[in-house]
Image: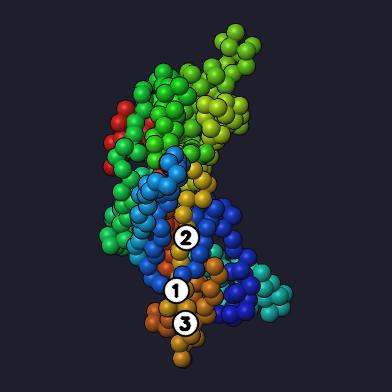
Amino acid sequence: MFGLDESNLQAVIHTYDLKDYYYPTLFPIKETGRLDWKMVEAQAGLKIAADLVSRGATIPKKTREALARIQGDIPKLAISREKDEEELTEYELLVLRATNNPDLKALIDFWAEDTKYCWDAIANRVEWVALRQISLGKVKFTNSNNAAIATEYDVDYSIPKEQKIGVATSYTAGRSGKPLSVDIPKALKIGKSIGANYKFMFMNPDTFVKFASQEEVVKKCATLVENMTGAADAPDLQTVNAYLAKKKEQFKGLQIIVIDQDITIETADGDRTTSNPFEDDVILFSESKVLGTTYWKRPIDANKIAGSVAEKVMHGHTLIKKYSTESPVTEVTEGISNVFPAWNLAGRSVLMQVSATAWNKN
């Protein structure tokens, strides 16, 4: 294509970033040399006390924590988009106009539309995987969430059933739930039993609205005047976090993080569904904002092939590749990445379902 070579393709693609995504923060990105990932599952945390012994006596030996490893394969993510003969004819007309009135921006915008689409699509899928797994404890690929079923990449972090819990009273059946007096203390107690000191509660916006609408949250976060006049309304995130911070002895510095994200999944038959990948009515309790690592490996597709005229640019964990076909005449753009966000804090986390008294999500 006129106006397109590897240098300006690289210049455009290197302007793309991941600032609109949560996963680079929750799962910092790390390159690996293998197509699988392996990490030590975080388990330490219990503060084991030393023993008092008589001088000259044998010192009792304590149990060494076993190193539990979680591992899996890094899947290949890929997407392709084509410009057909009609669109390419339109591009030729742009080129002709640019001959007399140079408008390289219009030319770049024409082909960069597809490169941005493919770049975003890879990041969207990594985000989807990251947020599904931390809100359900597992990820399962089906024909309703992935056009090509690849069940070998299903992941179950096997969170103990004692750490997947419900609430005393559902937040979806009214306003009589007990998040502050019963549910959060219960989660903190479970964490303490495994040596985890929870500092963050993750949830999506709809779940936060239900949480903040519970009568005891409204009353606890309201001012004295609002409570006296009955004019209190559901508090916002800043107000709830301020209350939790003020009650440090009870809530141990716990703060809420709202995951506000929408990802569109397109099935093989073209149907599209847009939703927040972080499951509704679920709260994740975690010790840290950093939950694991996003592992990636440079795809074999990025290698130079003798005789190939494809333009290829690696940026971060994603390869963007452009090439043409002659029959039919098309301009193809592909996004390719070997990448997976691995959650090593799963076994030290608690998942709470606020719509039921016991976990029944999966």
Q: How is the image coloured?
A: rainbow
Of 110 and 191, the residue lying toward us: 191
Observer-side mark, 3 or 2, equals: 2
- Pointer 3 residue: 303
Residue at 46% across, 91% down = 306
Q: Quadrant of residue 90?
A: bottom right
- Residue type, numbered disc 3: Asn
Q: Earlier in the sequence, mark 2 or mark 1?
A: 1
Residue 329 at x, y percent in the picture: 43, 79
Asked if residue 344 can be seen in this view, the reply is yes
Q: Earlier in the sequence, mark 3 or mark 1?
A: 1
- Pointer 2 residue: 294
- Residue type, numbered disc 2: Thr
Q: Are marks 3 and 2 in contact (CB under 8 Å)?
A: no
Above or below 6: residue 130: above
At mark 1, the secondary structure is: loop
Q: Are marks 2 and 1 in contact (CB under 8 Å)?
A: no
Q: Earlier in the sequence, mark 3 or mark 2?
A: 2
Residue at 72% across, 74% down = 101
Above or below 29: residue 250: above
Residue 236 at x, y percent in the picture: 58, 29
- Residue type, numbered disc 1: Gly
**Residue 337, label in figure:** none
Q: Quadrant of the N terminus?
A: bottom right
Crowdedness near tag 3: few (<14), some (14–19) or many (≥20) residues, C-alpha within 10 Å: few
Observer-side mark, 3 or 1, equals: 1
Q: CA distance from mark 2 to mark 1?
A: 13 Å
Residue 209 at x, y percent in the picture: 49, 30
- Pointer 1 residue: 33
Of 120 and 185, the residue lying toward us: 185
Q: Quadrant of residue 110?
A: bottom right
Q: CA distance from mark 3 to mark 1?
A: 15 Å
